[in-house]
């Protein structure tokens, strides 16, 4: 099978639409202009901050890279790098001068088995195979011209489907679901697997426990650690299990259209679907988000135009008005937090808190006062402060 056929349809469709966005076009034009004057200095930076692993130094890793490249149909020369880090991480960079660069953390290379490295390698090469670097998400989200809330939300949504595509490429290279799932378990938990007996079924059970709309209060909630170390990673395993059960992998599998429909439903767990939900818990979550957004936005120097724009992206046009009694809404926040603690699960509360962090970052930064309030809201919702801090510091780049 041609590896390009493995790409998620939602990734491909959103990718093509986003490339036509005026701001994305403007950023890509600037990048192309810089490249026209010479390369972007990626290789120079890698050589100065990490170690290039030659064939002589790391023959087994080069053999894995060659096997994955061959399976994915890539002929571009590869350069492999390692950087010192106690975390598990890997990245693929946009090619320069006809070479593709793949970088790994030292801890990952030391602790991952060959089959697991095939998945990681294939995942990174998948980003290149599907041209994901042509959509410069980091440049757009961190640029001098802030993207509209609609574009920002679309880019982050696309990036999740891009990871689905890259995961499929990695799984195609590894050719063993258990090994692939074990890789994602390591990436999610930070564990090497020496002290924990990995169970695919139990890992997948977390997806069922992450249902946002109808979960009973305090029941079936995944542990905070999964959100803190690698948010929503069990969804990636579930998405790969669906892929493994499709005609893309086995002749008697489910159809591609059914696969993509299932993937879309799965990824909806990461979207603010409670804004349209009709359940009692969804209404409580909306009320909490509304009051929390007003309180956070008003915490420093009043509510900015950018914050209003993001607010209306969540609640609809003209949902913000000068007639809103900001002080009264802020006074109601403790009661709405109390209602959320009583009637929603921890994952639901974490989702609202994540969306509050998105609103606070609307104008390009979060003030100290806003951070303090978000931490206070998180504490009252029984959510660890590290979740707030990591969400605010989230890196928009693909990896």
Image: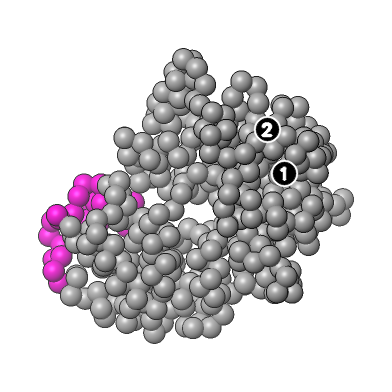
Residue 240 shows in the view: no
Residue under the image location 62 percent in, 39 percent down: 51
Foreground tag (1 vs 2): 2
Quick one: 210 or 169, which is closer to the camera? 169
Residue designated by label 2: 79
Callout 2 environment at 10 Å: few (<14), some (14 to 19), or many (20+)?
some
The answer to whether residue 328 is left or right of residue 1 is left
- Would you place residue 84 above or below residue 223 in this image? above
Residue at position x 54%, y 44% from top? 398
Of the pair 45 and 321, the residue shown nearer to us: 45
Residue 317 falls within the magenta-colored stretch: yes
Q: Which mark is residue 122?
A: 1
User: Residue 169: horizontal and vertical position, in percent?
Assistant: 72, 44
Q: What's the magenta region?
A: 301-328
- Please identify the quarter of the rendering in which residue 321 is found: bottom left
Q: Is residue 306 above or below residue 332?
A: above
Residue neighbourhood size for the residue with mark 1, other residues' Cα within 10 Å, grouped as few (<14), some (14–19), many (≥20) = many
Image coordinates for residue 320, horizontal then vertical, percent: 22, 56
């Amino acid at each position: 099978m041609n590896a390009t056929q493995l790409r998620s349809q939602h990734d491909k469709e959103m990718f093509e639409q986003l490339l036509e966005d005026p701001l994305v076009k403007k950023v890509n034009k600037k990048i192309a202009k810089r490249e026209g004057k010479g390369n972007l200095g990626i290789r120079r930076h890698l050589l100065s901050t990490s170690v290039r692993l030659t064939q002589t130094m790391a023959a087994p890793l080069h053999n894995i890279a060659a096997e994955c490249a061959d399976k994915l149909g890539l002929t571009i020369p590869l350069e492999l790098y390692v950087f010192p880090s106690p975390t598990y991480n890997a990245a693929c960079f946009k090619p320069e001068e006809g070479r593709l660069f793949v970088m790994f953390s030292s801890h990952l290379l030391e602790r991952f088995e060959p089959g697991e490295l095939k998945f990681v390698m294939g995942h990174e090469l998948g980003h290149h195979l599907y041209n994901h670097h042509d959509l410069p998400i980091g440049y757009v989200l961190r640029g001098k011209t802030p993207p509209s809330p609609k574009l920002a939300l679309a880019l982050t949504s696309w990036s999740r489907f891009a990871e689905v595509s890259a995961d499929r490429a990695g799984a195609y290279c590894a050719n063993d679901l258990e090994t692939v799932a074990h890789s994602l378990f390591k990436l999610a938990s930070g564990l090497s697997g020496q002290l924990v007996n990995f169970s695919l079924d139990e890992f997948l059970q977390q997806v069922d426990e992450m249902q946002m709309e109808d979960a009973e209060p305090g029941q079936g909630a995944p542990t905070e650690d999964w959100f803190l170390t690698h948010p929503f990673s069990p969804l990636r395993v579930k998405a790969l299990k669906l892929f493994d059960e499709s005609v893309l992998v086995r002749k008697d599998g489910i159809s591609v259209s059914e696969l993509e429909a299932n993937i879309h439903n799965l990824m909806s767990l990461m979207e603010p679907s409670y804004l349209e939900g009709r359940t009692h818990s969804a209404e409580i979550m909306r009320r909490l988000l509304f009051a929390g957004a007003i309180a956070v936005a008003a915490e420093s120097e009043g509510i900015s135009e950018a914050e209003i724009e993001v607010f209306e992206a969540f609640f609809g046009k003209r949902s913000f008005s000068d007639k809103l009694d900001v002080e009264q809404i802020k006074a109601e926040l403790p009661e709405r937090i109390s209602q959320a603690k009583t009637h929603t699960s921890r994952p639901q509360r974490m989702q609202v808190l994540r969306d509050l962090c998105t609103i606070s970052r609307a104008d390009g930064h979060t003030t100290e006062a806003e951070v303090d309030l978000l931490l206070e809201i998180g504490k009252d919702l029984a959510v660890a402060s590290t979740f707030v801090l990591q969400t605010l510091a989230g890196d928009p780049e693909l990896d």
